[in-house]
Amino acid sequence: MNAIYILWLRELKRYMRSRAMIVASLGQPLLYLLVLGFGLGPVFQRAGNGSYIQFVAPGVIGMSVLFTSVFSGIGLLWDRQFGFLKETLVAPVPRVTVMIGKTLGGATVATIQGLIVLIICLLAGFRPITWLAIPLAILFMILTAVVFAGLGVAIGSRLQDIQGMQLIMNFVVLPIYFLSGALFPLHGLPSVLSFITRIDPLSYGIDALRLLLIGTSEFTLVVSLVVLCGTALLFVGLGSYSFSKIQL
Amino acid sequence: MIKVEHLVKQFGEFTAVDDVSFEVAAGEIFAFLGPNGAGKTTTIKMLTTLLKPTSGAIEIDGLDAAKQSNETRKRFGIVFQDPSLDQELTAEENMDLHGVLYHVPRKLRHERTQMLLELFELWERRNDYVKTFSGGMKRRLEIARGFLHTPKILFLDEPTLGLDPQSRNQLWTHVKNLNKTEGVTVFLTTHYMDEAERVADRIAIIDHGKIAAEGSPDELKAQTETDSLEAAFLKLTGSTIRDERADASDQMRQMARMWRK
């Protein structure tokens, strides 16, 4: 437990100390919120779907959680390249412990980042239907963060160099985001697209946030909970396996 | 304490370690010398469970390093050749993190951290981020961290690289002391022949992945009919300069340096 705690704390300290990174990582969600929120707002409203800011805010929060958690896991690559990974791999603790500490640290950082984006959304005019749903929304943010931090570690364990990061960004992270329903409603999609959105775990995280914050959804809360818990177990398991196989 | 039999490591077609066998007795200081790219670090990586051998057997304190890697890791400590500190943490935080990972009780952790940071003259800078340290200070911290717990076996992979003579002297005095008082077995690599001659009980010279010679410093000199360890080393390994290919870590460090500029 001590090892998990100290590695979790390391992730948190690194995040808190990197103010430039905090600000930089808010750039993309802000751009989506402001440009898409205000730019597409009138079109969305004329189509009879209400306020786009209200609709897109949970998607932007989900985006922030996704990006931060995946890249926190992929941060293993930096640990590998700058040597710290060796320190953890030769330590007399099971590698699964190291992986869990890293994943929980990444998930915590991603949840904090999601909360910061939620506050920015509130400042931009987003209003949840009830404030009482916020704690449950945070729970779903945590679950989503664990899912993608696990995926990040699984990917980071296999990446050998920085060139691979661009590949992951373009072929894994962006498709997960764009196919999650973060920017568009999930109902009425062509069948192939509809199928793809349903196998994307982020769809369930964002849909749950949307249900809790604005009261509209495609899936029930229980379905989202079950899918996210299942995927979290799968990705953390996959991450643990990949991490245990690392050789330097 | 360490028993290596017919150890082989291949990377594709390239054989980095080629049928290496040796033994290190408990309480012995054993130096593993060789030119760049000879296979020293690859051997240490296999001994410390970072790399799986292609074939051969490694026994550490009676444990099969490949099959009982978790248990094996409890038996040793290591100072790496390359940096392995977290630059975003302070010196004390790096020591603390290491202490927790190595199950050093909190009180002892704090006592030893103070003793070691004072020994390597870093105590005044304990609350500074490692990224603000000079190369020599980082190296000293790396070594201090390696000594935080007292393992049965200590692996030192070119520990004095980038250290000034004072720090080197401090390091070897501490290593000798640990070896004498705690009976710690030491497995070291170095490019400095005078250091190997000064501290090692026994030396193995590796070249092109194979052990070229093994024995005490005097035995090696006698075997090669030379009057110094350096001359013996050159006689066994030749005088051609060896190149090493930059690996992904080197490329990343070069890139990071470019960004910082």
Image: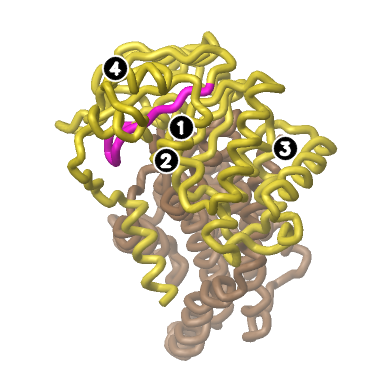
Chain colours: A brown, B yellow
The amino acid sitting under disc 4 is Gln
Q: Quadrant of the C terminus of chain B?
A: bottom left
Which residue corresponds to mark 3? A2
The amino acid sitting under disc 3 is Asn
Of the two numbered discs 4 and 1 in the rendering, the one whose residue sits closer to the viewer: 4
Residue B192 is labelled as 2
Q: B25 or A217: which is nearer to us?
A: B25
Image-based side of A104 in relation to A80, left or right = right
Q: Is residue B200 above or below residue A54?
A: above
Q: Is residue B199 above or below residue A37?
A: above
Chain under numbered label 1: B
Chain under numbered label 3: A
Q: Which residues are magenta?
A: B29-39
Residue A169 in the image: x percent, y percent? 36, 62
Instruction: Residue at 65%, 19% (x, y): give it.
Output: B183
Residue B196 is labelled as 1
Task: Tell me which label, 4 or 1, sits earlier in the chain.
Answer: 1
The amino acid sitting under disc 2 is Tyr
Asked whether the residues under the numbered discs 2 and 3 touch, taking CB atoms below 8 Å apart as contact, a structural biologist would say no
Image-based side of B224 in relation to A32, left or right = left
Residue lying furthest top in this view? B62
Chain under numbered label 2: B
Is residue A193 among what the camera can see? Answer: no
Instruction: Residue at 27%, 51% (x, y): give it.
Output: B246
Image-based side of B182 in relation to A226, left or right = right
Q: Is residue B243 above or below residue B87?
A: above
Circle 2 — which element? Answer: loop
Q: Are marks 2 and 3 on the same chain?
A: no
